[in-house]
Amino acid sequence: MASTEGIVPITRAFLASYYDTYQFPPLSNDVARLSAEIRSFTADLLRHSPAAQGEERLLVSELESEPPHKVDENMWKNREHMEEILFLLEKSHWPQTLRKQSSPDDAELATVIDRLHQKFQTSLKTLETFQAKNSERVFNTVMTYIPQDFRGRLIRLQRERSERNKQAEVEALVSSGATIRERYALLWNQQMERRRLLAQLGSATGVYKTLVKYLVGVPQVLLDFIRQINDDDGPMEEQRQRYGPPLYSLTTMALLIRLFISLSWGRFETRKLSKQELAVFEEAVDVYTTEFVRFITFISEVFANSPFFIPAEVAGALQGRNNDDYQETSVPAGKIHEVSLAVDAINSYIAWDFSLVQGKINLDIGFSVEYTNPSGQKSLILPYRRFESDQGNFCTCEVGNYKLIWDNSYSSFFKKVLRYKVDCIPPVTEPVEPATEVEE
């Protein structure tokens, strides 16, 4: 477990100074120019034939709105647009006339489409890799500061279970014949759920309410970080202000390209692409994919080097946390001290952390764990051993009574001052939330 002594979570002011060293070179002027030209082409197509109900109408409506404010939501939007564009560029989804390639112009367009399809595939793969690596980096950084015992394992198990459930939810949706748009709506809701779980870990609520209560040794600085990192006016807002505008432009450009292809395919039998439209379309895809990959490459370096914690003196203050929930008792010579825990659910965790208050002579004490089932039958879970201190845990396989025993019966003269904390942590399960509840 990494030390957080003398550090505090990153602040927006600190990120502002950090981002000063990472100035994103402006997007090519071709982004604005080509976006304007594609927008003009879509307007011509809509004058030729108004947007049909369904996907076309949805895309037109989306174009009339501002791009999302959050950086990661824009990433998901670009990913959705790329997948939708790849879908449209697949030969099976070309207009029937184009699939026949009955004219030299159609053959030329087919060749161009194949090349642009490859460009989008490469850009999509770059984005998927970036998102996966960034997600792992954040989680692994958080876990660096979590004690590497049952607490860390519980959090990892919770994450793994949650991700399996999310993947199963996506697969079920796809199997039901859902559209790409519907799949990405679910993926974004799942991303917001990850944020909620992260905030719950920081504020000891929801799924982590019982767990965080027992996170002895987890620094408050970490819990503060994961609770406030995505606040509307928190550290990530500085990131949105700095790097949002170029990303917003790319999100809009991707939407324009997607709308242009969709409208063109829907009207292809009566209105084929002109030479100028094809040239601009081809250049727009080249510029978008090149600039988007450049942005992702840049932001990957920014994220990889961005600190999560900074020295307290840099931020101005260090807030401490008193998480001392230990009890202290004296175990006389020849006596024992017992703590009984009633376990109502299997897969609960029995956890302990204890030490002896030492004087001039180093002392130890016997320790064991005993289980009594509901019918009164006893069995030894942890054999007797002598310790000066110990921290441990195990996952229960049966309900019943678990007794932790500190044994000083072997001592004829010395009492032992025992400082300890024990508890039974219920199984970590995800709360069932209303399907309509979406946190923005």
Image: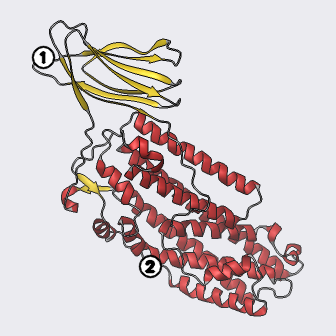
Mark-to-mark CA distance, 2 and 1: 69 Å
The answer to whether one can see residue 287 in this image is no
Residue under circle 1? 361
Residue in front for this viewpoint, 386 or 31: 386
The answer to whether one can see residue 183 in this image is yes
Q: Is residue 246 left or right of residue 189?
A: left
The residue positioned 59% from the left and 71% from the top of the image is 289
Q: Dividing the picture into quarters, in which one does residue 53 lie?
A: bottom right
Give the color scheme: rainbow, by chain, secondary structure or one colour: secondary structure
| Image disc number at residue 26 | 2
Which badge, 2 or 1, comes first in the chain's sequence?
2
| Image disc number at residue 35 | none
The percent position of residue 345, horizontal first and vertical second, equals 52, 31
Query: Secondary structure under badge 1?
Result: loop
Q: Dividing the picture into quarters, in which one does residue 272 lie?
A: bottom right
The percent position of residue 211, horizontal first and vertical second, equals 42, 41
The percent position of residue 249, horizontal first and vertical second, equals 52, 79
The residue positioned 64% from the left and 70% from the top of the image is 81
Quarter holding the N terminus is top left
The residue positioned 21% from the left and 61% from the top of the image is 314
